[in-house]
Amino acid sequence: MTDRTESETSRRALLLGAGAASLALAAPATAQVPTSPPVPPEPGAKRRLGMVLFEGFELLDVFGPLEMFGMIKDRVEIVTIAEKAGPVKSGAGPAAMADHGFADAPRLDIVMIPGGIGTRREVDNPAFMQAIRILAEATPQVATICTGAGVLAKTGLLDGHKATTNKMAWKWATAQGAKVLWVPKARWVDDGKFISSSGVSAGTDMALALISRLYGKAMAQWVADRAEYRWHDDPADDPFAAKNGLS
């Protein structure tokens, strides 16, 4: 075989190999997360979820859970509520827009209270605390994220109920409610009307747990998959308790 013939043979082999690789890349995926939820929406009105905002809120406390519930906007309407409508600055700097003030807040099915550095100030704000108490009393499902549990505890509504909170802020948050049955090792705690999460990212796991309770485990897993989020679905899986000397 001549050098020229060998060269042409090698070239043809390379071209055939490249073509096969291109076809493999172009082939459709054999599995894909469905674009439609596994459970069709029930007839009737949507649930309304209200997220409380205050100056100094923690960004992920708010937007982690809202991203999860936002995946099922065909059955959940999301609104934001603060002392007054308008921009509310987070602890990290960026502001979020409150749709309603407490005075004109619509009826809710779920209310969520986030944490953040601003909780330290708000527990000593009588007007804010009274508004939170009224809102929580009137709403069937109340969820807290991070040190938001300290805010709710200060109202007295968590007395006699199990709850958890941010492990790094454990001492401060638990001091807001001596009669709360605080659970030191928990990613989240579900106690019926009240569901509470540990710190920051745990709120996203808790939100998925609440979706699971309301719409089924398959729906919660579908939401997590759509978000490409690895759901920590065991509420007792809490490595941060030990890291903060709580277990």
Image: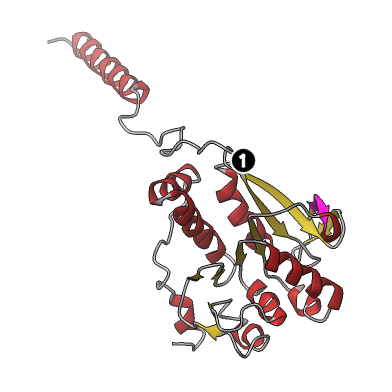
Q: Is residue 156 magenta?
A: no
Left-right relation of 80 to 170: right
Residue 27 image offset from top left, x and y in percent: 33, 22
The segment highlighted magenta reads 97-101
What colouring style does the render use?
Answer: secondary structure
Quick one: SS at disc 1? loop
Can residue 198 be seen in this snapshot? yes
Q: Quadrant of residue 116?
A: bottom right
**In terms of secondary structure, what is the magenta stretch mainly?**
strand
Specify the quadrant of the image occupied by residue 45.
top right
Residue shown at the point (86%, 59%) measured from the top left: 103
Q: Percent from the top left, x then y, of residue 70?
A: 60, 45
User: Can you say whether 164 is above or below 76 in the image?
Assistant: below
Location of residue 199 by image quarter: bottom right
Which residue occupies the foreground of this view, 79 or 236? 79
The residue tagged 1 is: 45
Q: How many marks?
A: 1
Which residue: 45% across, 80% down?
Answer: 185
Asked if residue 117 is positioned above or below residue 42 in the image, the reply reads below
For residue 94, say whether it is visible.
Answer: no
| Image x and y of residue 109, in percent | 63, 55
Provide residue 227's location: percent of width, then percent of height: 50, 45
Position of the N terminus, as image quadrant, is top left
Q: Using residue 210 as the reference point, say whether residue 34 is left or right of it.
A: left
Above or below 10: residue 237? below
Amino acid type shown at disc 1? Ala
Q: Quadrant of the C terminus?
A: bottom left
Q: Is residue 100 magenta?
A: yes
Q: Is residue 88 left or right of residue 145?
A: right
Which residue is drawn at the image coordinates 46% and 49% (left, top)? 215
